[in-house]
Image (cartoon, rainbow, N blue to C red):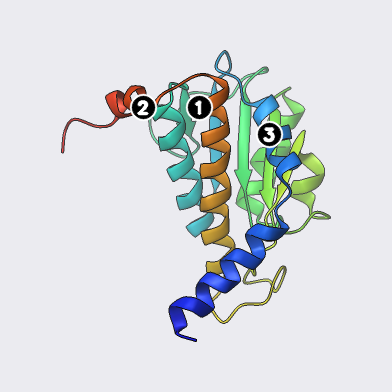
Amino acid sequence: MTLINDVMHEVNEVMGLVKEDQIDDAEKVIQKDRRIFVLGAGRSGLMAKGFAMRLMHIGYTVYVIGETITPSVQKGDVLVSVSGSGKTGMVVEPTEKAKDDGVKIVAVTSNAESPLAKLGDAVIVVPGATKAGDGVKSIQLLSTLFDQSVHITLDVLCLKLSRRDHVSNDAAKAEHSNME
């Protein structure tokens, strides 16, 4: 078996453990008439930003927490927070504040018992290895397996949203950057 096959085996193992009904629960929270905010630190934050970009492509009003043009989060908005351990302070603390302010929370974590998961109105458990040692063990460094699997999971969520909202590939392509 090659290293590529080993990595793909790990990703397939984790994706086989992601529960589609949890993705469906998140789909119910994310609606076009709500502003969507995403939050994550480090590589989890990069996965969240990729998700935000996809949401924009399919017609959502979406913001990344920490960017200079991000407005304040308000009651009725949705916050998608991503943290492998579910304990990262710079993710959990703003998520707690948002929850207290009446924001709906979608928590994405490898740890169903984490502080982040406990805040979620919808929780997606992606049990890929994290630097904290949670999830499926991996030959890959730190939280790579979690990050890879979160990327796929959130892309599946976007596909479900696009199908629910009847957004075609051509419509999404029309929203893609034309400044390249």
Of mark 2 and mark 1, the one earlier in the sequence is 1
Pointer 2 with pointer 1, Cβ within 8 A: yes
Q: Horizontal and vertical percent for residue 13? A: 65, 67
Lower position in the chain sequence, tag 1 or tag 3 = 3
- Is there a contact, CB below 8 Å, between mark 1 and mark 3? no
> Which residue does the image show at 60% across and 65% down from the upper left?
12
Q: The residue under label 2 is which amino acid type?
A: Ala
Q: Position of residue 171 (x, y in %)?
A: 35, 22
* Amino acid residing under circle 3: Ala
Residue where numbered disc 1 is placed: 162
Q: Position of residue 156 (x, y in %)?
A: 55, 42
Tag 3 residue = 26
On screen, 45 above or below 59? below
Q: CA distance from mark 1 to mark 3?
A: 14 Å
Q: CA distance from mark 3 to mark 2?
A: 21 Å
Which dot marks residue 78? Answer: none
Left or right of 122 in this view: 59: left
Say which quadrant the C terminus sits in: top left
Q: Position of residue 3 (x, y in %)?
A: 46, 83
Q: Which residue is mark 2?
A: 172
Of the pair 31 and 7, the residue shown nearer to us? 7
* Residue that extends furthest to the left in the rendered view of this protein: 180
Q: Name the kind of residue labelled 1 in the image.
A: Ser
Measured along the vertical axis of the image, is residue 118 above or below residue 16?
Answer: above
Instruction: Give the distance between the C-alpha atoms of the residues marked 2 and 1, in whole angstroms.
Output: 9 Å
Q: Quadrant of residue 54?
A: top left
